[in-house]
Image (spheres, rainbow, N blue to C red):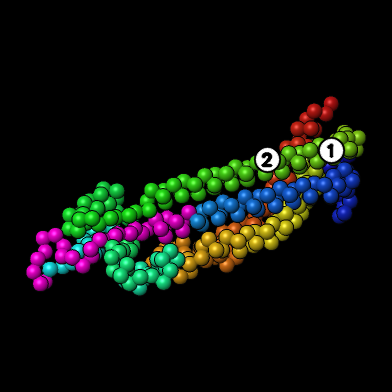
Amino acid sequence: MARRSLLRPPGFDELGLRRAMADRMLPFLVAAMAFLAALALAGWVGAATLAQHWQHGAGASLTVQVPQPGDPAIGRTGPDARSRLDRVIETLTATPGIAGAHALSRPELGALLRPWLGGGDAALLERLPAVIAVRLAEPPPTPAAFAALDTALRRSAPGTVLESQGLWIGRLLALARSLQACAGAALLVVAAVAAAVVAVATRAGLAARREAIEIVHGLGATDGFIATRFAGRATLLASAGGIAGALAALPVLLALARLAAPFTAGSAAAPASAGPSVAGIETFSGSLPVALWLLLPGLPLAAAAIGFVTAQVTVRRWLRRLP
């Protein structure tokens, strides 16, 4: 039989693949895999967004405590002597890598301590050390610069404490990277399972239509012709499952985003200089990150690609074993 005579007219299923590869089990299993893949993608994007927030938020700031802020600084005497607080702020602003330093007022400090001290005591607040919020520039000071800054602050105002979140931010970033690695591994496992499901369904279809395939193959149909028919059917079913799984995951992801919103509360009120992470966190709090909206439509495409490639490979390997 000539090759062109084997070409089917529209709607003709010469190999009976609609019966051999049913449109129920395979799409359901692929939909389950797409659902899990959407959750893994959400975990990866969420970990990346929070890591960026930590790095550009708490990681881009430090705190300085100055006891007896109103006392004269070391080496300063006379009526024009600068206070310890002024001297520390002067040292901070003169240090490269520091964008700004703001000394918290007593009302601001009282508002921060209100959850622990209630209404607050004015006499207690007066005895507390002054607190300076320092904003780091890009790039931030090096560890050697931090050590030099700490020495300079202690020299000009003994007892000054320089607190940096660098250690904890490093640990949080390592945790975020490990979560991203776990999400990536989960995606690989899901893709492998989806490929195995398509391969099993394709082999079942080959076994069910073995006689018809042998007849068509003996009449001159090429391996590519038969493999393309199976791949087209697998691609259609896998893409349908991918669409169903992505749509099923969408309300779950929106619910998870609402649950995660309290953990990012206050990001919208952050200053504009806090960096691009603020906008990303606002998006994450409001609904879903933009990156996740862009990745979700890729799930049906990925499912279709897995279905096509797996069916092609499975059918061609099976045909090579024919006598």
Q: Is residue 178 left or right of residue 231?
A: left
Residue on which disc 2 sits: 192
Residue on which disc 1 sits: 204
Q: Answer with mark 2 or mark 1, whichever residue precedes in sequence.
A: 2
Q: Is residue 84 left or right of residue 307?
A: left
Q: Note whether 121 is above or below 226 in the view shown.
A: below
Residue found at the far top of this picture: 323
Query: x and y percent of residue 271 in the render?
Result: 41, 69
Dot 1: element = helix
Query: x and y percent of residue 240 in the render?
Result: 76, 54
Quadrant for the C terminus, please. Answer: top right
Query: x and y percent of residue 176 in the render?
Result: 50, 49
Quadrant for the N terminus, please. Answer: top right
Circle 2: residue type = Ala
Question: Residue at position x 62%, y 50% from top?
Answer: 40
Q: Crowdedness of circle 1 by 10 Å Cα count: few (<14), some, many (20+)?
A: some
Examine the image and state in which quarter residue 182 appears.
top right
Asked whether residue 71 is drawn in magenta, I would say yes
Q: Note whether 266 is above or below 49 in the view shown.
A: below
| CB contact under 8 Å: marks 2 and 1 | no
Circle 1: residue type = Ala
Q: Is residue 117 left or right of residue 81?
A: right
User: Which of the numbered marks, if any, corresponds to residue 236?
Assistant: none
Q: Note whether 118 is above or below 136 in the view shown.
A: below
Q: Is residue 80 left or right of residue 57?
A: left
Q: Crowdedness of circle 2 by 10 Å Cα count: few (<14), some, many (20+)?
A: some
Span colored in magenta: 51-80
Q: Label 2 vs label 1: CA separation?
A: 18 Å
Examine the image and state in which quarter residue 74 appears.
bottom left
Count the marks.
2
Dot 2: element = helix
